[in-house]
Amino acid sequence: MPFWSRGSRDKEAGKSQPTEASSMAGQESAAISSAPSAQSERVVEVLTAAAGLAGGWPAELPRDTFKTVDFDRLVERLKDYQEREYPPGLLGSDHSKPDYRIIGGKIGRASNLVQDMKLCTQASMPGQRKVDTNDPEAMARAVFQLVEHYAMTRLARFLFMIPTARDEVDRISRGKKSIVVGELLVIEVLKGVEQLLLEICGEVGFGSFGDAEVTQKFLSVVDSARTE
């Protein structure tokens, strides 16, 4: 049975996100449209929505970033992080995925001993805290705090909200109402971030990583969809 750890954000926090998107839409749309890169109207609308949901445009991405990006390929890359199974452990794959749910008004995460051990031994924990790797529950709590730490950055929110923003722009263009649920949107960001962190674990081998490597990994996801 997995151990469920709960995050610091309650589900009411997520509900404010759609309001942010609508209030910032004009400001972000003007900035994106006036950038050197000529974007299709649909891409501008999606980026505007994602930036609004994220609380603004991330400083790490220049405004003309998407000039040479295959946007649909980027969305598929981001969705792959959010939907993929955990990487195999020593005994192979157990076909499980990151499991986040609303529990008692807060978002909770199900522990996974193999993946939790990877992250606790390779990632630099927020506040440089030490984690007792002999305590599965302590590892599960530490991993959720780690994932939350990066999921709360504007860069992570912006990137992993792009798939939902695209779906919502397409829905609205067909005359349908938006169905964004704030806490579920946060969960999609958490799932994407967790898988991205685990991918870094595989890339560094027996090494460790911290903020600089994670930021570079986020940016490399965008670079992987470039057309030139």
Image: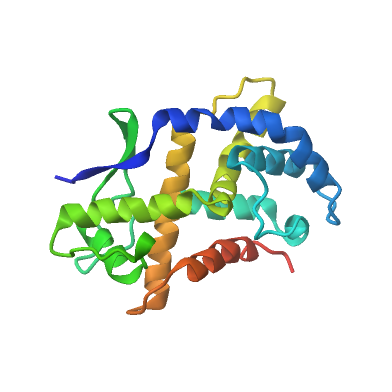
- Quadrant for the N terminus, please: top left
Q: Is residue 175 above or below residue 49?
A: above
Query: Could you say which is closer to the camera, residue 23 or residue 201?
Result: 23
Query: Could you say which is closer to the camera, residue 133 or residue 49?
Result: 133
Q: Residue at x 26, y 51 (%)?
A: 141
Is 10 left, or right, of 27 in this rendering? left
Residue 42 visible (yes or no): yes
Is 90 left, or right, of 208 in this rendering? left
Q: Is residue 40 above or below residue 101?
A: below
Residue 112 visible (yes or no): no
Is 222 left, or right, of 173 in this rendering? left
Q: Residue at x 43, y 53 (%)?
A: 149
| Residue 66 % position (x, y) | 73, 56
Query: Which image quarter: residue 134?
Result: bottom left
Number of labelled discs?
0
Query: Could you say which is closer to the camera, residue 225 or residue 151?
Result: 151
| Residue 62 % position (x, y) | 73, 59
| Residue 173 % position (x, y) | 71, 27
Is 26 left, or right, of 215 in this rendering? right
- Quadrant for the C terminus, please: bottom right
* Residue at the extreme front: 127
| Residue 46 % position (x, y) | 69, 40
Query: Which image quarter: residue 70?
Result: bottom right
Q: Residue at x 32, y 79 (%)?
A: 206
Say how the picture is coloured: rainbow
Q: Residue at x 82, y 41 (%)?
A: 30
